[in-house]
Image (spheres, rainbow, N blue to C red):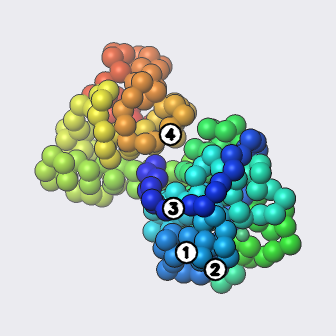
Amino acid sequence: MNIIESNLSFGSLSKRGITNKIILHHPECNGWTIERLHDLHKNQFKWSGIGYHFYVRKGGSIYRGRPEWSIGAHCPGQNAVSISVCLEGNYMVDNMPEEQFNAAMELVIYLKNKYGITEIGGHGDYYSTDCPGVNFPLEKFKGNLKNNKLVFNYREWIKKVQRELNIQFGSGLNEDGYYGPNTQKATVLVKKGARGNLTKLIQEKLINIGYSVGKWGADGAFGQGTYDAVLRLQTDKYIGADGIVGPNTWRILFTS
Ligand SMILES: [Zn+2]
Protein backbone atom coordinates (compact mmCIF):
# COMPACT_ATOMS: atom_id res chain seq x y z
CA MET A 1 0.00 0.00 0.00
CA ASN A 2 1.31 3.38 -0.94
CA ILE A 3 0.25 6.47 1.01
CA ILE A 4 1.06 9.66 -0.85
CA GLU A 5 2.32 12.40 1.45
CA SER A 6 0.52 15.61 0.65
CA ASN A 7 2.68 18.35 2.20
CA LEU A 8 -0.31 20.36 3.37
CA SER A 9 0.19 23.03 6.01
CA PHE A 10 -2.06 23.00 9.04
CA GLY A 11 -3.05 25.39 11.79
CA SER A 12 -3.00 24.14 15.35
CA LEU A 13 -3.82 20.46 15.86
CA SER A 14 -4.48 18.37 18.98
CA LYS A 15 -3.20 14.90 19.66
CA ARG A 16 -5.80 12.14 19.65
CA GLY A 17 -5.56 9.93 22.72
CA ILE A 18 -7.90 7.13 21.66
CA THR A 19 -8.41 5.45 18.30
CA ASN A 20 -11.30 3.02 18.46
CA LYS A 21 -13.02 3.31 15.10
CA ILE A 22 -12.71 4.22 11.45
CA ILE A 23 -15.32 6.51 9.94
CA LEU A 24 -15.93 6.64 6.19
CA HIS A 25 -17.04 9.68 4.21
CA HIS A 26 -17.55 10.95 0.71
CA PRO A 27 -16.99 14.61 -0.25
CA GLU A 28 -20.10 14.42 -2.45
CA CYS A 29 -18.12 15.60 -5.44
CA ASN A 30 -15.87 14.25 -8.16
CA GLY A 31 -12.50 15.32 -9.46
CA TRP A 32 -11.37 17.18 -6.38
CA THR A 33 -7.71 16.96 -5.39
CA ILE A 34 -6.76 16.74 -1.73
CA GLU A 35 -5.32 20.25 -2.03
CA ARG A 36 -8.71 21.57 -3.10
CA LEU A 37 -10.47 19.89 -0.17
CA HIS A 38 -7.78 21.19 2.17
CA ASP A 39 -8.26 24.68 0.81
CA LEU A 40 -12.04 24.46 1.30
CA HIS A 41 -11.73 23.28 4.90
CA LYS A 42 -8.93 25.65 5.81
CA ASN A 43 -9.76 28.85 4.02
CA GLN A 44 -13.55 28.71 3.76
CA PHE A 45 -14.53 26.67 6.80
CA LYS A 46 -11.66 28.22 8.79
CA TRP A 47 -10.60 24.88 10.20
CA SER A 48 -6.95 23.94 10.84
CA GLY A 49 -6.91 22.27 7.43
CA ILE A 50 -8.52 19.27 5.76
CA GLY A 51 -10.68 17.45 8.29
CA TYR A 52 -10.04 13.91 6.97
CA HIS A 53 -6.98 11.81 7.73
CA PHE A 54 -6.98 10.03 4.39
CA TYR A 55 -8.43 10.69 0.96
CA VAL A 56 -8.81 7.88 -1.56
CA ARG A 57 -9.25 8.87 -5.19
CA LYS A 58 -11.42 6.92 -7.62
CA GLY A 59 -8.37 5.45 -9.33
CA GLY A 60 -7.17 3.99 -6.04
CA SER A 61 -4.44 6.41 -5.00
CA ILE A 62 -4.34 7.12 -1.28
CA TYR A 63 -3.41 10.56 0.04
CA ARG A 64 -2.57 11.55 3.56
CA GLY A 65 -4.65 14.42 4.85
CA ARG A 66 -4.61 15.60 8.44
CA PRO A 67 -1.77 13.93 10.39
CA GLU A 68 -2.78 10.48 11.60
CA TRP A 69 -1.99 11.28 15.24
CA SER A 70 -4.25 14.33 15.37
CA ILE A 71 -7.90 14.87 16.12
CA GLY A 72 -9.79 15.18 12.85
CA ALA A 73 -12.73 17.36 11.87
CA HIS A 74 -15.23 15.07 10.20
CA CYS A 75 -17.86 13.77 12.64
CA PRO A 76 -19.03 15.70 15.70
CA GLY A 77 -18.87 13.56 18.83
CA GLN A 78 -16.41 11.09 17.29
CA ASN A 79 -13.44 13.21 16.28
CA ALA A 80 -11.46 12.53 19.46
CA VAL A 81 -11.67 8.75 19.08
CA SER A 82 -11.66 8.02 15.35
CA ILE A 83 -9.68 8.04 12.13
CA SER A 84 -11.43 9.28 9.03
CA VAL A 85 -11.17 8.08 5.47
CA CYS A 86 -12.86 10.05 2.70
CA LEU A 87 -13.53 8.44 -0.66
CA GLU A 88 -13.74 10.70 -3.69
CA GLY A 89 -17.13 10.76 -5.35
CA ASN A 90 -20.77 11.48 -4.82
CA TYR A 91 -22.17 8.22 -3.55
CA MET A 92 -25.71 9.50 -3.56
CA VAL A 93 -25.52 8.74 -7.30
CA ASP A 94 -22.12 7.20 -8.22
CA ASN A 95 -21.12 3.56 -8.12
CA MET A 96 -17.76 2.85 -6.56
CA PRO A 97 -14.95 1.69 -8.88
CA GLU A 98 -13.26 -1.53 -7.81
CA GLU A 99 -9.84 0.15 -7.68
CA GLN A 100 -11.10 2.65 -5.15
CA PHE A 101 -12.87 0.07 -3.02
CA ASN A 102 -9.81 -2.18 -2.94
CA ALA A 103 -7.42 0.65 -2.09
CA ALA A 104 -9.67 1.96 0.68
CA MET A 105 -10.17 -1.56 2.02
CA GLU A 106 -6.42 -2.09 2.11
CA LEU A 107 -6.03 1.16 4.02
CA VAL A 108 -8.81 0.20 6.43
CA ILE A 109 -7.21 -3.19 7.17
CA TYR A 110 -3.85 -1.53 7.68
CA LEU A 111 -5.40 0.90 10.19
CA LYS A 112 -7.33 -1.90 11.87
CA ASN A 113 -4.15 -3.87 12.45
CA LYS A 114 -2.14 -0.85 13.50
CA TYR A 115 -4.60 0.37 16.14
CA GLY A 116 -6.44 -2.84 16.97
CA ILE A 117 -9.66 -1.27 15.68
CA THR A 118 -12.72 -3.46 15.36
CA GLU A 119 -15.36 -0.87 14.56
CA ILE A 120 -16.01 0.82 11.24
CA GLY A 121 -18.93 2.97 10.26
CA GLY A 122 -20.16 5.56 7.85
CA HIS A 123 -20.54 9.19 8.91
CA GLY A 124 -24.31 8.64 9.03
CA ASP A 125 -23.93 5.86 11.62
CA TYR A 126 -22.86 8.49 14.15
CA TYR A 127 -24.44 11.70 13.00
CA SER A 128 -27.51 12.91 11.22
CA THR A 129 -26.24 13.02 7.64
CA ASP A 130 -26.65 11.00 4.45
CA CYS A 131 -22.83 10.87 4.07
CA PRO A 132 -21.26 8.66 2.72
CA GLY A 133 -24.25 8.22 0.41
CA VAL A 134 -26.88 5.60 -0.34
CA ASN A 135 -24.72 3.90 -3.00
CA PHE A 136 -21.66 3.67 -0.77
CA PRO A 137 -20.83 -0.04 -0.19
CA LEU A 138 -20.72 0.37 3.57
CA GLU A 139 -21.89 -3.14 4.41
CA LYS A 140 -19.16 -4.58 2.20
CA PHE A 141 -16.56 -2.59 4.13
CA LYS A 142 -18.01 -3.74 7.44
CA GLY A 143 -18.12 -7.39 6.38
CA ASN A 144 -14.60 -7.42 5.03
CA LEU A 145 -13.22 -5.70 8.12
CA LYS A 146 -14.92 -8.25 10.32
CA ASN A 147 -13.41 -11.11 8.37
CA ASN A 148 -10.07 -9.30 8.23
CA LYS A 149 -9.79 -10.07 4.58
CA LEU A 150 -8.48 -8.02 1.74
CA VAL A 151 -10.45 -8.15 -1.42
CA PHE A 152 -8.02 -10.15 -3.44
CA ASN A 153 -8.29 -10.85 -7.12
CA TYR A 154 -6.07 -13.85 -7.86
CA ARG A 155 -5.84 -13.38 -11.63
CA GLU A 156 -5.30 -9.67 -11.28
CA TRP A 157 -2.43 -10.40 -8.88
CA ILE A 158 -0.72 -12.72 -11.37
CA LYS A 159 -1.21 -10.14 -14.09
CA LYS A 160 0.50 -7.53 -11.95
CA VAL A 161 3.43 -9.85 -11.26
CA GLN A 162 3.76 -10.56 -14.99
CA ARG A 163 3.63 -6.86 -15.80
CA GLU A 164 6.30 -6.12 -13.20
CA LEU A 165 8.60 -8.87 -14.51
CA ASN A 166 8.16 -7.45 -18.01
CA ILE A 167 8.88 -3.89 -16.95
CA GLN A 168 11.86 -4.65 -14.73
CA PHE A 169 13.43 -7.62 -16.48
CA GLY A 170 12.07 -7.54 -20.03
CA SER A 171 10.61 -11.00 -19.54
CA GLY A 172 8.28 -10.74 -22.52
CA LEU A 173 5.46 -12.50 -20.67
CA ASN A 174 1.88 -12.52 -21.81
CA GLU A 175 0.13 -10.44 -19.15
CA ASP A 176 -2.82 -12.80 -19.12
CA GLY A 177 -3.15 -13.55 -15.42
CA TYR A 178 -2.42 -17.25 -15.86
CA TYR A 179 0.42 -19.00 -14.11
CA GLY A 180 2.37 -21.34 -16.37
CA PRO A 181 5.96 -22.45 -17.07
CA ASN A 182 6.95 -19.17 -18.72
CA THR A 183 5.84 -17.13 -15.77
CA GLN A 184 7.53 -19.51 -13.36
CA LYS A 185 10.78 -19.35 -15.39
CA ALA A 186 10.70 -15.54 -15.44
CA THR A 187 10.65 -15.19 -11.66
CA VAL A 188 13.63 -13.58 -9.94
CA LEU A 189 15.11 -13.81 -6.45
CA VAL A 190 13.61 -11.26 -4.08
CA LYS A 191 15.16 -10.91 -0.65
CA LYS A 192 15.56 -8.77 2.42
CA GLY A 193 16.45 -5.18 1.54
CA ALA A 194 14.48 -5.27 -1.73
CA ARG A 195 12.12 -2.42 -2.40
CA GLY A 196 9.42 -1.88 -4.99
CA ASN A 197 6.39 -3.31 -6.70
CA LEU A 198 7.50 -6.95 -6.79
CA THR A 199 8.06 -6.90 -3.04
CA LYS A 200 4.68 -5.25 -2.57
CA LEU A 201 2.99 -7.95 -4.65
CA ILE A 202 4.74 -10.67 -2.64
CA GLN A 203 3.55 -8.98 0.57
CA GLU A 204 -0.03 -8.70 -0.69
CA LYS A 205 -0.06 -12.40 -1.48
CA LEU A 206 1.51 -13.33 1.87
CA ILE A 207 -1.13 -11.33 3.72
CA ASN A 208 -3.87 -12.84 1.62
CA ILE A 209 -2.82 -16.38 2.46
CA GLY A 210 -2.52 -15.61 6.14
CA TYR A 211 1.10 -14.61 6.66
CA SER A 212 1.24 -11.19 8.26
CA VAL A 213 4.21 -9.12 7.09
CA GLY A 214 4.16 -6.86 10.15
CA LYS A 215 2.48 -3.67 11.13
CA TRP A 216 3.34 -1.71 7.99
CA GLY A 217 1.41 -4.03 5.73
CA ALA A 218 2.22 -4.30 2.04
CA ASP A 219 4.50 -1.28 1.83
CA GLY A 220 6.92 -2.53 -0.83
CA ALA A 221 9.88 -2.71 1.56
CA PHE A 222 11.25 -6.21 2.25
CA GLY A 223 12.12 -5.87 5.95
CA GLN A 224 12.19 -8.19 8.94
CA GLY A 225 8.41 -8.67 9.01
CA THR A 226 8.34 -9.87 5.40
CA TYR A 227 11.42 -12.02 5.94
CA ASP A 228 9.74 -13.71 8.92
CA ALA A 229 6.55 -14.25 6.91
CA VAL A 230 8.48 -15.90 4.08
CA LEU A 231 10.30 -18.13 6.59
CA ARG A 232 6.99 -19.23 8.11
CA LEU A 233 5.53 -19.98 4.70
CA GLN A 234 8.61 -21.96 3.65
CA THR A 235 8.56 -23.92 6.90
CA ASP A 236 4.84 -24.68 6.52
CA LYS A 237 5.30 -25.85 2.93
CA TYR A 238 8.45 -27.88 3.63
CA ILE A 239 10.62 -26.00 1.18
CA GLY A 240 14.07 -24.70 2.16
CA ALA A 241 13.52 -22.01 4.77
CA ASP A 242 15.94 -19.20 3.91
CA GLY A 243 13.65 -16.16 3.90
CA ILE A 244 14.41 -15.57 0.22
CA VAL A 245 11.67 -15.61 -2.40
CA GLY A 246 13.19 -17.89 -5.04
CA PRO A 247 11.64 -20.32 -7.59
CA ASN A 248 10.07 -22.66 -5.01
CA THR A 249 8.59 -19.87 -2.95
CA TRP A 250 7.25 -18.19 -6.09
CA ARG A 251 5.63 -21.48 -7.08
CA ILE A 252 3.90 -21.64 -3.70
CA LEU A 253 2.77 -18.02 -4.00
CA PHE A 254 1.41 -18.60 -7.49
CA THR A 255 -0.46 -21.73 -6.52
CA SER A 256 -1.76 -20.76 -3.07
ZN1 LIG B 1 -19.03 12.70 6.03
In x, y percent, where is residue 34? 51, 69
Residue 232 seen by the camera: yes
Earlier-in-chain disc, 3 versus 4? 3
Residue 9's label in the rendered image is 3
Of residues 175 and 197, the one drawn nearer to the viewer in this rendering: 197
Q: CA distance from mark 2 to mark 1?
A: 7 Å
Q: Which residue type does callout 2 highlight?
A: Gln
Q: Which residue is mark 1?
A: 39
Name which quarter of the figure residue 200 lies in: top left
Residue 218's label in the rendered image is none
Q: Residue at x 22, y 57 (%)?
A: 174
| Relative horizontal placement of residue 21, taking residue 63 as reference (left or right) | right
Q: Check if mark 3's residue and mark 4's residue have beta carbons within 8 Å.
A: no
In which quadrant of this rendering is ligand 1 seen? Answer: bottom right
In x, y percent, where is residue 54? 57, 59
Q: Which residue is mark 4?
A: 217
Q: CA distance from mark 2 to mark 3?
A: 15 Å
Earlier-in-chain disc, 2 versus 3? 3
Q: Label 2: how many residues lie within 10 Å, few (<14), some (14-19) or many (20+)? A: few
| Relative horizontal placement of residue 17, taking residue 246 as reference (left or right) | right
Q: Which residue type does callout 4 highlight?
A: Gly
Residue 44's label in the rendered image is 2
Q: Residue at x 15, y 46 (%)?
A: 169
Callout 3 secondary element: loop
